[in-house]
Amino acid sequence: MQGGLAAALFTAMEKSRVTWMGSSSKFTAQSSGELPITIKPIGESRLATVEFPAADYRRFYNGMSNSALWPLLHYRADLLRYESDAYTSYFTINDMMAEAVCRTVEPNSLIWVHDYHFFPLGDCLRRRGVESPIGFFLHTPFPTRSVLNCLPKHRELMRTLAAYDVIGFQTEDDLLRFRDYATRDLSATMMGPTDLRLGEHRVKLGVFPIGIDVERFVEAADRGSRSRTLGRIKRGLGGGKLVIGVDRLDYSKGLPLRFQAYERFLTRYPDERHRVSFLQITPPTRSEVESYKRIRTELASTAGDINARFGDVGWLALNYLNESFPPDRLAGFYRISKIGCVTPLRDGMNLVAKEYVASQDPRDPGVLVLSKFAGAAKELNAAILVNPYDTEEVAAGLYQALYMPLAERLERWSTLMRILEAGNLQSWYDSFIRALRTAAMARPPRMDRSVA
């Protein structure tokens, strides 16, 4: 989704004179040799996209990454679908990406690897003789060892993390769970609270909660609040209040339970019908994965049932949209929404929660209702924190937010904004790069090329 992680990384990249590498939307017929790489300037930086073989990439992305790793990282072992050929293709794509990195970056460049798709990329680079500082950041949660143990060959995969100089996590809890897994399943030892020795290699662990470009959302919300489109939406509310949810179509976001909670809200507080509307923006994603097909069907059915039961000719209870909007447009939607409802079952951080807060009117801010299982809850504890599995609690949270006095809303919002400004996107970027430089300077030269 354009308003989420990709937009945040893109913004950080524009200003930092880096080369950002990723997969292309195009595929190549060749399975060996030099893969096609396209490079174009983005601000002061470069965007390099690689064309991979289609069959391997599908198994890497839809298979291993999103049918095996994603569900486990979000505590859904019941949705794990592991296939040995997908595991093989996962390593094949990582090896191809390593070759592309070596062709593109300057010698001795800092290399920062992002997310679970590329767990073994650092190891693939070390096998090619790369001695540069290499860091890894996990944007998702890290699960308990009992959950990760469900993955076949989990030790083989996770041992490749020894190639990195720094491994970063969104929250302290994620770091502690990784530390527990590494010491108990990988025979790692701790040389201090955040220094891990794995085999012959020493890795620095750190917590780096990702932020947003706060000023951008403040400015975009100000512009959006004056737009004709939002003016029409506000007039259509007829003095009523809007609740907004913005999420990718994913089972980790807790959308079926969120719809049930809203249904419970309308049942428990019947006087709020016609006074409140819910706008849920949910762009489809990973449409080839079976579990995503099922949830899309379920949500469409539930939304229809809610509108059939509670709506009428003049009032749509739940406006459920399967489309994407650019970040600036979302900022306008956030501004006119009196409640931001962010209730994932598990989330590494959840930038929508931060975007919603940053987009509010400083004179009359809305209220964030936030899942206690989102990484953002560790920072944004001035929000109304709820258990997304408890639909009664979420319904009560929505009601509390609707009738919260202005003084309390201002106090909560001011507290949240101070947190966002202190931990903005640039400070996240800078803190990780500092940690990577420091850790790389402290380590002795690597004597061997293989760390698996």
Image (cartoon, rainbow, N blue to C red):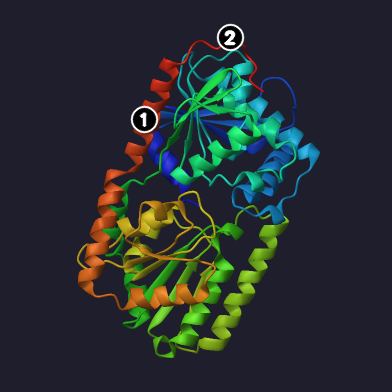
The correct choice, above or below, for 240 with respect to 331 in the image is: below
Residue at the (42%, 25%) spot, across then down: 436
Q: Which one is nearer the viewer's eye here, 182 or 34?
A: 182
Residue at the (48%, 63%) spot, across then down: 343
Residue at the (59%, 33%) spot, across then down: 183
Residue at the (47%, 55%) spot, across then down: 374
Residue 268 at x, y percent in the picture: 47, 86
CB-based contact (under 8 Å), mark 1 and mark 2:
no
| Secondary element at tag 1 | loop
Tell me how far mark 1 sits from mark 2, CA to CA: 32 Å
User: For mark 1, does the 10 Å Cα neighbourhood hold few (<14), some (14 to 19), or many (20 or more) residues?
Assistant: some
Q: Which one is nearer the viewer's eye here, 268 or 188?
A: 188
Residue 393 at x, y percent in the picture: 46, 74
Residue for badge 2: 447
Instruction: Identify the amino acid type marked 1.
Output: Ser
The correct choice, above or below, for 96 with respect to 447 in the image is: below
Quarter of the figure with residue 275: bottom left
User: For mark 2, does the 10 Å Cα neighbourhood hold few (<14), some (14 to 19), or many (20 or more) residues?
Assistant: few
Determine whether, in the image, residue 194 is placed left or right of residue 220: right
Q: Which one is nearer the viewer's eye here, 210 or 386?
A: 386
Query: Which comes before the other along the chain, label 1 or label 2?
Result: 1
Instruction: Identify the amino acid type marked 2.
Output: Met
Is residue 118 among the parts visible in the rendering? Answer: no
The correct choice, above or below, for 274 with respect to 260 in the image is: below
Q: Which mark is residue 16?
A: 1
| Secondary element at tag 2 | loop
Q: Which mark is residue 206?
A: none
Is residue 263 among the parts visible in the rendering? Answer: yes
